[in-house]
Image: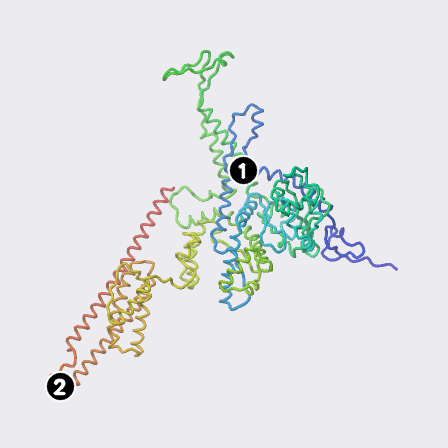
Amino acid sequence: MTQNPPTIPSGLNEFDLLNLDPQTLAPPESRLRDVKAASSIYDTLRKADEKSSSNRARLDAMFDGASPYDQKVLFSTGQGNRTNLNFGEAQRLLDVSMSAYVDLYTSLQKLVRVSVTVGEPAERQDAEDIIAEELTEMMREWPEFHSNYLRLCTEFTKHGVGVAYFEDPRNWKFRVCGFGDFLIPRQTPASEEAIEVGCARRQYLLHELYGFIKNEEAAAKVGWDVEEVKRVIVKNARTTGRNGSNTYADWEITQREMKNNDLYTGLENTTVSVVHMWVREFDGSVSLLMFAEESPKTFLFRQNSMFKKPEHAYVMFAYGVGTNGTYHSIRGLGNRIFNHIQTSNRIRCQMIDSAMMGGAVMIQPETQRALEDLSFTMYGPYSILSPNVKIIEKAAPNLTNTMQPALTDLQNQLAMNVDLVSTYGNQSSPYRNNLQTEHDLAVSSRLTGSTINLFYSSWSRLLREIVRRVTTNPKRDEYAASFYKRCAERGVDAKIIASLNHEKTVAVRAIGAGSAANRLLALRELNSIAGGYDEVGRRNLLRDITSERVGRDLVDRYAPANPEPRTTVDAKIALLENQAMQSGQPVAVLDSELHGMHLRMHAPLLQQLVGGIQTGEIDPVQALPIVQMVYQHCAEHTNYLAADPSAKAEVAQMKQLLQVGEEIITNFTRKVEADQRKAMEAGQGQGQEGQQAGPTPTDLKMQEHQMKMEIAQQKAQIEMQIKQAKADQDLALKDAERAMKLSGNATQ
């Protein structure tokens, strides 16, 4: 009876079948069985990368200032005096490109945005802001975060691919390298999911390796081969000891030195080159293997399926997808500008040589003896040349017509290739409107913006993994512990932090994509439509504009995040003035006071008095003198505040309140007069002709007329101040526009 052959599991290819169990076709525990196979794969990857490594070295040399010609070749061919300089164009272009990424890091108050899944919507928003702020603070507190970020951006920009990787599944502190230290198979598609195996080489000091196995029992449980680590340490501990012994011949002596925290042993010995290898398993998880680069006997460390997903182990920053969609076909800024920079350096060197030759005196000796006796003799203002030589007349080369056009065209081509300085558009006219200026800004940042979008795609995944490790790791380092402590002090406990939806964790994008000019343009457009935003939106826009001008560290000085107004000494003075006016004591207004703060303190009192009179809760006869006093005081403050164009909205609101107060004063004054007239008439009808019950109608009319005149005068003063402030503002805007036009003409 024949047996049916075992079926091949879905998702496996012929290459994968090589590691399957021959009987059951079940996937093994790991696709890599021993250190011999791992070392062979590493050697193959390193040999395949030799040509790419040579190309990267040439690019790095260009950025580091290497000369365009080989100086040894020039000396051997008798051209040792030729100019051979690197004029630093490549490094300047790299610095300009890096400025965008530095701006992304420094201009943001929060690097990451998180999503809380518990609590009310309003509470969630506050908790998300607090967690994001403290996570940003935690990352910036780590000293290596800034340097790792810059190196990551440099590798990404210069060579096209940068790598951020983690050495264990819990620690959130990542390491950075490029393809010079991170090897993957050729023709690997540009996706982390497509990387079958990756290798990173790292140098360890002896005491660093010893630290991993100091607690041998715990080290063995997590995956360390203690005996192999000891063997590697002893093998590399070859420095003669201070006590005169030859070498550290065995582990006992080496261990004793290590336990004594002997820096001499750790620093004076050679470093150990250790290979970190990540292997993609059949189920999609990633195993981490570590072995010595030279003559390994077994793995130093091994933990199968250590990472659930590739992005938990490493995040690739790719400068596009290359010519055929593979990592090794991706090219960065260095490859794009290499030929242009080398040609530019050579042209400039030739220009200097031509200029030096053009300024030199050409002398032709007639004989060999004349050449040997060639000399200049100076007699005061005269110079005497030795005999048998003659001066050759020559025309100085016109570099403007020969080399300069070629160099100019080369610089224009380079500018268009890297798109750092826009050469598009009609530059002949010095007069340019806002639309033309905005178009030039958009064109000049086109390539940079697309590159930053590629960077953000990977940057979000890296920050997501950092946040996941910080919020799920029960063992917290000093930075993570400080993060939890600060969150607790601000009312966000560990339960809320544990509820984060990590799939929605993303990097915060900087306004303007790293360009200060684009950010100013965007903020100006937003400011023109700010009237359609709610109060929170307008406050955030104000903070962004202020932060752009003074920096994120000083923004709270001018536009605090807390919507509550900040109190000053004038606020308490205004409260004391309210008490004085309520007791019937008039208070003068000084021009040096903070009129806006005073109005915010006086306006509630005026509203309370007016509302009480309207509802009948306050006796108008007794309250009218106080209302008139508070009204007069507020009107004077409004008169001063109207001169400030930025307080236009507050002045308008105060004018409405003053108008209501004026109506109350006028109406109830008339009512009091009418009641007094009725009382007088009733008293006269009862035979009390000779007694005066109150002021005469003529006196009342005079008082009413005087009050109306005072109110009209105050209104006229306020309106005049507002008109004058508006006229001053319009004049200032016209002067600014005229100055900008003059400045633009001068620049052109």
Residue at image mark 1: 64
Residue 357 appears at what percent x and percent y? Answer: 47, 24
Q: Is residue 53 above or below residue 650?
A: above
Q: What is the secondary structure assignment of the residue under circle 1?
A: loop
Task: Locate residue 214, reporting x and y percent.
Answer: 65, 51
Q: Quadrant of residue 39?
A: top right
Residue extending farthest to the bottom is 686
Q: Which mark is residue 688?
A: 2
Task: Name the N-terminal-most of marks 2 and 1.
Answer: 1
Labels 2 and 1 touching (C-beta < 8 A)? no
Instruction: Name the quarter where the N terminus is drawn.
Output: bottom right
Q: Out of 484 and 379, give the one closest to the viewer.
A: 484
Image height check: is 90 above or below 287? above
Q: Residue at x 24, y 73 (%)?
A: 625
Res 503 → quadrant: bottom right
Residue beneath the point at 57% across and 60% down: 471
Q: Residue at x 62, y 38 (%)?
A: 54
Specify whether residue 280 is in view.
no
Task: Give the residue type that dot 1 points to.
Answer: Asp
Classify 10 Å Cα crowding around label 1: few (below 14), some (14-19), many (20 and above): few
